[in-house]
Amino acid sequence: MSAGEHNDLAVAYEERGEYDLAIDHLNRAIRKDPGNPLFFTNRGNVLLKRGDEEKALEDFEKAIEIDHDYLDAINNLCFVRASRGRSLHSCPELIREQLENRRELPWQFLDTAGLVLKSMDAPGRAIETYREAISRCAGCSKEQLAWLERRVKSLEDRYPK
């Protein structure tokens, strides 16, 4: 079985809630192709679902070490750090680089960027970033869109112009 096939199988196991089997297949994928950031990111996602936040963060960081611009790993690392009140470590710099260097960032990344900016006590920039996320949220569910709109309103209420 190829590394990619192990990854695909792991994703299927993850979707069924069979986290140990998912991790086993991701470990096999990583052994076959240790330079693929997707495998570390996916294992981090499974570890997070299983409740092992520290190991998940390590995997997200490893994915970024392999590919400094790997957006999914940056998003997941910074979301976990910011949403759980953890130290942001490298997140402000990683987020700043992506905001400056990419024109088309997905709304999910912009949501995380807004959260990091809010955590950095930059509410004006966070509001702008959330508004940009809303503008790119064409495929969002009503719940996701409402979530983003509540984040903007909350910041505007706390930090009126």
Image: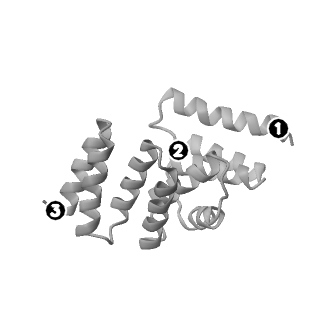
Residue at (77%, 54%) from the top-left corner? 122
Residue 39 x, y percent position in the rendering: 33, 60
Query: Which quadrant: the N terminus?
Result: bottom left
Marks 1 and 3, how far apart at CA: 52 Å
Q: Nearer the viewer, residue 155 or 5?
A: 5
Q: What element carries label 1?
A: helix
In this figure, which residue is indicated by the disc labeled 1?
Answer: 158
Residue 58 x, y percent position in the rendering: 48, 62
**69 lies above or below 145:** below
Q: Earlier in the sequence, mark 1 or mark 2?
A: 2
Q: Which of marks 1 and 3 is nearer the N terminus?
A: 3
Residue at (45%, 64%) from the top-left corner? 70
Identify which amino acid the numbered label 3 is placed on. Ser
Q: Earlier in the sequence, mark 3 or mark 2?
A: 3
How many labels sit on residues? Answer: 3
Residue 13 x, y percent position in the rendering: 26, 42
Identify which amino acid the numbered label 2 is placed on. Arg
Q: In this view, does 117 lie to the left or right of 64?
A: right
Q: Which of 129 and 122 is in front in this view?
A: 122
Q: What element carries label 2?
A: loop
Residue at (44%, 61%) from the top-left corner? 59
Mark 1 surroundings within 10 Å by alpha-carbon count, few (fewer than 14), some (14 through 19), many (20 or more): few
Mark 2 surroundings within 10 Å by alpha-carbon count, few (fewer than 14), some (14 through 19), many (20 or more): some
In this figure, which residue is indicated by the disc labeled 2?
Answer: 136
Q: Which numbered disc covers residue 2?
A: 3
Identify which amino acid the numbered label 1 is placed on. Arg
Is residue 104 visible to us here?
A: no
Q: Is mark 3 on a helix, strand or loop?
A: loop
Residue 51 x, y percent position in the rendering: 47, 44
Q: Which of 52 and 26 is in front in this view?
A: 52
Q: Cβ–Cβ below 8 Å for labels 3 and 2? A: no
